[in-house]
Image (tube, rainbow, N blue to C red):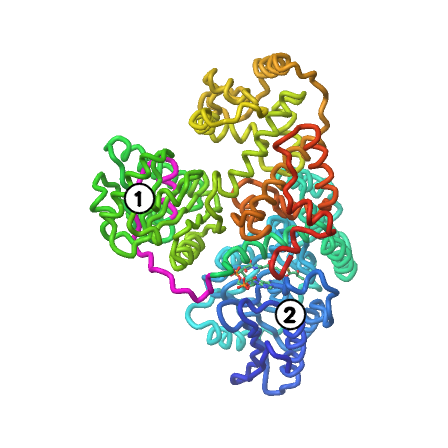
Amino acid sequence: MSPGVRYERRGAVGVITVDNPPVNALSRAVRQGLIDGLMQGLGDEAAKALVVIGAGRTFIAGADIKEFGKPLEPPDLNRVIAGLESAAKPTIAAIHGTALGGGLEVALGCHYRIALASAQVGLPEVKLGILPGAGGTQRLPRLIGAKAALDMITTGDFVRAPKAKELGIVDAIVEGDLLEGALRFAEEAVRSGTSGRRLRERDEKLAELRGNPAFFAEYRAAIKKRARGQESPLRSVDAVEAAVNLPFEQGLKREREIFEELITSTQSRALIHAFFAEREAMNIPDIPAETPVRAVKRAAVIGAGTMGGGIAMNFANAGIPVAVVETAPEALERGLGVVRNNYAATVAKGRLDQAAMDKRMGLITGTLDLAAAVKDADIVVEAVFEEMAIKKELFARLDKLAKRGAVLATNTSSLDVNVIAAQTARPQDVIGTHFFSPANVMRLVEVVRGAKTGKDVVATAMRLGKSLGKVPALVGVCDGFVGNRMLFQYAREAEFLLEEGALPWQIDKALQDWGLAMGPFAMSDMAGNDVSWRIRKQHAATRPNDRRYSHLADQICEMGRYGQKASAGWYRYEKGSRTPLPDPEIERLILAESKRLGLERKPIADDEIVKRTIYALVNEGAKLLEEGIALRPSDIDVIYLAGYGFPAWRGGPMFYADTVGLDKVDADVRRFHETHGYFWRPAPLLERLARDGKRFADLNPGKG
Ligand code: 3HC
């Protein structure tokens, strides 16, 4: 038998075990092994029913994504599934961990499905830019109805076993040992037989929406809003509509055609790149995976502001007790109140139960006593006001108060971690953990490695980030690190575009239409325009005055237009509303500024807006790579995808540049350099790659 699958008999039941660590992906060998196992089981007269089960931590997590991009080798997964479905003996999928994608499709081929209560099922293919390609779009609607199937397939969301039971995906929930439960269940299945259990033969659940194109048209319209720009959810609707209106075999053929179109699409390549990039970000070249990490059982967060509160929630959510330290009782009360309200809102939305909220709140203790809070902490995260003098003083104190071996982390978004570390006699323990606001929601953490940060401290911060449910990416020390240093170039270009002829709402719309969650001006209004204004004012004295500088952002702050919180920023807002509305006052301001600068305003095409802003990210990203601040292009992509609302189906700024072609990007950057000057000096790395006909992906280890 092929490695990765084994067959054995337990009493009157044949057990086919998939054992292909880490996640039992359906590699070619596993597909062949399943066919062999099935043949053996069918030929084994003593076996009256067959159980398919996964070894290790999970059932089957889907097709082997590493095989994508190469011609798919036989046997086809559809053949495996058809074999399980047409078997004369009852076949039972016994699910623990996750049954995802092709894994759930294998389970849908079986006559029965049982699961541990902790298991989850899902068809997450849309998240990889494809659709279920082994009958999932045809069998799931037959099992649970087209509407419920569409909801699962077009979102890719996982469904927990109890809910899967309610929906009818799972026939029974097993308590205790899964295999024992499966063997018991198999006895019943032998009595009930296979009749009526082959999904391909059933279509009673499809009748409701048959010949109802209006339903599908509405569903597509909703997706166009929800998953702007993404092809795979829309194409999934086509496949489910085929399931409803066509005979099974024809529907399956339609699914296959769409699958084959999508699997070679740029969107799919981008999403698969994003999947591997996130995992690759955990590998640090000079820090082996087996580097021992420090145990983090207790944390302290200094500062109960928006960042501090959000960071504390991350610890509590992961079950780690955390002390939150403030200097004044009112500030502490206010901070903890915000945390409580955040949890309460999640409870109100039904995404958390009250008992879980109470448990999490119980793990957060507020205090004014810094010494007591940090004494036993394994990690201290500083989230105080972004001012070097304050941070320096605090770290000097932490050096005296924290226990030996504690990780001392700063949440600074731009200050020099090495200067902060130098305030202590233990710079090896100091690191940056740059969370993104709101810290309890945003997935990105930039882990900032100082010149003297210990390797075990880097490994600890990376591992901790992952266990807090975040996406950690390692960066080096520089002004703004990776994400914000790139964003600075992007925002600057957006402001220059205003002076040259565009308006905020045109720029935001062009970038949103391109796929960003939000354009730069709506984003700045949301974050608070005063934040970067204060930073700019600190740097005003050192700003070279021979370079172009847009005063517009300063002007709107001088007018008190701090953004949403002031009901006025780059946009105006109705009281209590977050909807940005174009404001004639801003238009007048911009027109007057262009005039003052002697610039003749010209219409700027959306395409040019996208190039000016996105290529500003790319060019700066290339400089960060040359300087070694970012380890690899894929890390930059991870940072933009997890922290800045960059559309995953574009793969991140560096991947996107590759899809355009670096020769074209380089030509535009040179053109901008000639027209707009200094800031657009092309990154030598970009020039070199373009000249050599290479891609940023060529710098990524392994997977591209
Ligand atoms: N193929 C190949 N490798 C996979 C894989 C897959 N489907 N799923 C996970 N892996 C690898 C990861 O790359 C990682 O490798 P690494 O250790 O070398 O970095 C390792 O398995 C562990 O994965 P995670 O770090 O993600 O582990 P978690 O425990 O956090 O998550 C998981 C496990 C929920 C299974 C998550 O990995 C996941 O969501 N995987 C993708 C599932 C998926 O998308 N399945 C559908 C595939 S497409 C398909 O089935 C097409 C079909 O319709 C024909």
Q: Earlier in the sequence, mark 1 or mark 2?
A: 2
Ligand 1 lies in quarter: bottom right
Callout 1 secondary element: loop
Does any atom of ligand 1 lie closer than 8 Å to the CB of label 1?
A: no
Q: Which residues are magenta?
A: 287-314
- Determine which residue is flagged by label 2: 27
In this view, the residue in front, 166 or 470, is 470
Q: Look at mark 1 in the image and give the residue it sits on.
A: 423
Where does residue 423 sit, x and y in percent of width and height?
31, 44
Q: Position of residue 432 (x, y in %)?
A: 40, 46
Disc 2: residue Cβ within 8 A of ligand 1's nearest atom: yes
Residue 583 at what x, y percent from top left? 58, 17
State the residue at coordinates (61%, 40%).
226
Mark closer to the observer (1, 2): 1
Q: Is residue 636 left or right of residue 135?
A: left
On-image quarter of the C terminus: bottom right
Say if the magenta span includes residue 312. Answer: yes
Horizontal and vertical percent position of residue 608: 71, 31
513 or 654, nearer to the observer = 654
Which residue is at the front of the view, 33 or 473?
473
- Residue beneath the point at 61% across and 63% down: 62
